[in-house]
Image (cartoon, rainbow, N blue to C red):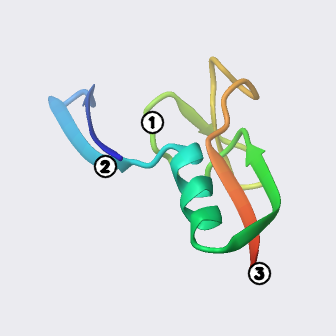
Amino acid sequence: MALLALSQENGAGSVEDHGWVHPLGDLVSALVRHGLAIRSLKEYPFMAYRRFRDMERGRDGYWRLTDKAGMLPLMFSLKAVKL
């Protein structure tokens, strides 16, 4: 886990955003280590909110990167059961 800091220009000045990065492998490994079995893991090329300035909202209401549409996973769903 690492702290991520992003700076973006918003027209009125610079905006800095902080968040925690949780690599997918760390999350899956922690679940398995605690006795859960992964039943499904799906990645999606969209998000439920606008995280970056260069995103556009689709007809379905989800946000996508305009210049890399479909190339990067932006959200995932994971289903696990306790063994």
Q: Assess disc 3: are there few (<14), some (14-19) or many (≥20) residues with their C-alpha within 10 Å of its C-alpha.
A: few
Nearest to the eye among marks 3 and 1: give it.
3
Residue 66 at what x, y percent from top left? 63, 24
Locate residue 3: give its quadrant. Answer: top left
Q: CA distance from mark 3 to mark 1?
A: 38 Å
Disc 3 is placed on an element classified as loop
> Could you tell me which residue is drawn at 61 percent across and 41 percent down?
74
Disc 2 is placed on an element classified as strand
**26 left or right, relative to 1:** right
Q: How many marks?
A: 3
- The amino acid pointed to by label 3 is Leu
Q: Which residue is mark 3?
A: 83
Closer to the camera in the image, 76 or 83: 83
> Could you tell me which residue is drawn at 72 percent across and 60 percent down?
77
Q: Which residue is mark 1?
A: 52
Query: Taking 45 as reference, is 29 above or below it?
Result: below
**16 left or right, relative to 21:** left
Which of the image's four quarters has the C terminus?
bottom right
Locate residue 9: give its quadrant. Answer: top left
Disc 1 is placed on an element classified as loop
Furthest toward the left, the residue is 13
Residue 67 at what x, y percent from top left? 63, 17
Task: Using the image, tell me which numbered label, if any, was put on residue 19.
Answer: 2
Is residue 48 at all visible to an observer of this figure? no
Task: Using the image, tell me which numbered label, if any, was put on residue 12.
Answer: none
Q: CA distance from mark 3 to mark 2?
A: 32 Å
Residue 18 at what x, y percent from top left? 24, 46
Residue 35 at what x, y percent from top left? 65, 74
> Could you tell me which residue is drawn at 69 percent across and 73 percent down?
36
Q: CA distance from mark 1 to mark 2?
A: 13 Å
> Could you tell me which residue is drawn at 19 percent across and 38 percent down?
16
Furthest toward the bottom, the residue is 82
